[in-house]
Amino acid sequence: MAEALLRAKLHAAGLTDWTVTSAGTWAAEGNAASDFSALLIAEQGLDIEAHRSQPVTDRLMQKADLLLCMETDHARSLQRAYPSHQDKIYTLRQMVEKRGSVRDPYGGSRRQYERMVAEVDELLERGLLRIRALALENFEKRGKDGSN
């Protein structure tokens, strides 16, 4: 869901060559998006029916220029597991100078999902300039020294 929203915002900004990939800190591989997520995203004109979950891997960490986590525990876990990539791991709320996590409504009501989608959409909208700047900074750093 966040992947589709961010991709749409990047495309609207003319950044159609950027890659956005979703992966879960503790995700099982191959699960579809929740029904409410798919429905609410479809109501915004986006399609995540083909989305399947995947776990974070060494390869994804190497390729990523920026990792945005929904929850602070996820960010901390990735920072511990991948200390050489700490400089590119943030929570989504940090993109707008906020602390805390985006609440995961998994198994909850439609209203809980609506609140989460609205929060993620607002955070991406307000944080897009910082997201772009951090990703570009890490991309350039990775290109110069071949690391990260």
Image: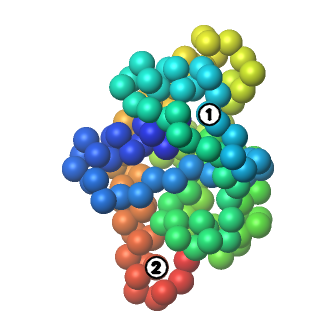
Q: Please tell me whether residue 87 is drawn above or below residue 94 in the rendered image.
A: below
Characterize the local packing of mark 1: few (<14), some (14-19) or many (20 or more) Cα atoms within 10 angstroms: some
SS of the residue at dot 2?
A: helix
Q: Residue at x 52, y 33 (%)?
A: 49
Q: Residue at x 62, y 71 (%)?
A: 59
Compare residues 50 and 78 and report the one nearer the observer: 50
The kind of residue tagged 2 is: Arg
Compare residues 4 and 136 and report the one nearer the observer: 4
Compare residues 4 and 128 and report the one nearer the observer: 4
Q: Quadrant of the C terminus?
A: bottom right
Q: Is residue 75 left or right of residue 125?
A: right
Residue 97 in view (yes/no): no
SS of the residue at dot 1?
A: loop
Residue 121's label in the rendered image is none
Frontmost of labels 1 and 2 is 1
Identify the residue position indicated by label 1 in the image: 33
Tell me residue 75's x, y (percent). 68, 53
Instruction: Tell me the distance, in whole angstroms, between the alpha carbons under discs 1 and 2.
Output: 31 Å
Compare residues 127 and 18 and report the one nearer the observer: 18
Identify the residue position indicated by label 2 in the image: 142
Characterize the local packing of mark 2: few (<14), some (14-19) or many (20 or more) Cα atoms within 10 angstroms: some
The kind of residue tagged 1 is: Ala
Q: Is residue 103 left or right of residue 6?
A: right
User: How many labels were placed on the picture?
Assistant: 2
Tell me residue 83's x, y (percent). 70, 72
Residue 128 in view (yes/no): yes
Tell me residue 2's x, y (percent). 51, 38
Question: Do the CB atoms of the residues marked 1 and 2 lie less than 8 Å apart?
Answer: no
Tell me residue 21's x, y (percent). 51, 53
